[in-house]
Image (spheres, helix red, strand yellow):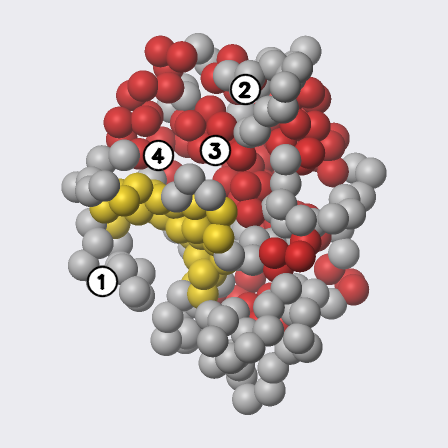
């Protein structure tokens, strides 16, 4: 698999791993924090036990094969989740790509803490619900939503957000009796929308590298370029 900017990385398609027990606990537990008095996040929240997480974890951490999960949507665009397994420097990169772009745009990275702007709830739902069925990658709406929900950086969520995440969790095997609590926990631990605001030409998301004119000072150039911030795309 070739992605601009990762020319020498051992990237391989990772979509097959989504069906394996333990993948979702590995992917989403990085988003789960807990406060004093709260239950510690556990694999059981996602319908598996600790032993189920070991095999997917080994695959996700393989420095010889960096798994990439593609979420293709309109206009040839894809959101891509890459498990970046440099020896001694593990991380997860979230990118936005389009064949005509000179390079992918960084949405966020995780290496023990989160960096980058993330996405609003509206835009995560828009991407999740508009799969490009002709392109390779993840087409299941529930899986697409859960792959992208760690990107969530939003101050105000619509009332239906917990139900949407709950439905996605039960679709991938989370227990019915605890999925709502898990959904509430994931959404409660989202990042603030302030992390999506950018200014200055040095930001990788601030310039008009794909257009001659650019967005306003508080709008991601990527989302502006994809026309995802228009009101008709509200979820």
Tell me the distance, in whole angstroms, between the alpha carbons under discs 2 and 3.
10 Å
Tell me the distance, in whole angstroms, between the alpha carbons under discs 3 and 1.
27 Å
The outermost residue toward the right is: 159
Q: Secondary structure at mark 1?
A: loop
Residue 140 in view of the camera? no
- Dot 1 alpha-carbon crowd within 10 angstroms: few under 14, some 14 to 19, many 20 or more: few
Tell me the distance, in whole angstroms, between the alpha carbons under discs 4 and 1.
22 Å
Query: Residue at (61%, 14%) from the top-left corner?
Result: 39
Q: Which mark is residue 88?
A: none
Tell me the distance, in whole angstroms, between the alpha carbons under discs 4 and 2.
25 Å
Q: Nearer the viewer, mark 4 or mark 2?
A: 2
105 lies left or right of 11: right
Mark closest to the chain's N terminus, 4 or 1: 1
Q: Which residue is mark 2?
A: 41
Q: Secondary structure at mark 3?
A: helix
Mark closest to the chain's N terminus, 3 or 4: 4
Q: Which mark is residue 16?
A: 4
Q: Secondary structure at mark 2?
A: loop
Image vertical order of residue 76 relative to residue 63, above or below: below
């Amino acid at each position: 698999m070739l992605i601009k900017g990762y020319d020498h990385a051992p990237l391989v398609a990772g979509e097959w791993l989504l069906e394996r027990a333990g993948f979702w606990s590995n992917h989403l537990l990085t988003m789960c924090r807990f406060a004093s008095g709260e239950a510690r996040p556990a694999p059981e929240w996602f319908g598996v036990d600790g032993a189920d997480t070991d095999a997917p974890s080994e695959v996700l951490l393989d420095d010889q094969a960096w798994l990439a999960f593609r979420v293709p949507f309109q206009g040839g665009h894809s959101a891509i989740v890459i498990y970046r397994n440099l020896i001694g420097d593990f991380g997860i990169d979230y990118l936005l790509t389009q064949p005509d772009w000179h390079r992918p745009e960084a949405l966020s990275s995780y290496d023990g803490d989160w960096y980058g702007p993330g996405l609003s709830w509206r835009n995560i739902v828009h991407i999740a619900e508009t799969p490009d069925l002709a392109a390779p990658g993840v087409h299941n709406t529930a899986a697409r939503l859960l792959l992208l929900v760690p990107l969530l950086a939003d101050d105000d969520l619509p009332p239906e957000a917990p139900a949407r995440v709950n439905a996605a969790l039960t679709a991938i095997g989370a227990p019915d009796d605890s999925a709502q609590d898990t959904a509430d926990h994931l959404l409660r631990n989202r990042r603030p929308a302030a992390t999506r605001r950018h200014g200055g030409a040095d930001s990788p998301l601030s310039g008009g590298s794909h257009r001659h004119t650019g967005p306003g000072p508080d709008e991601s150039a990527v989302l502006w370029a994809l026309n995802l911030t228009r009101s008709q795309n509200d979820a």
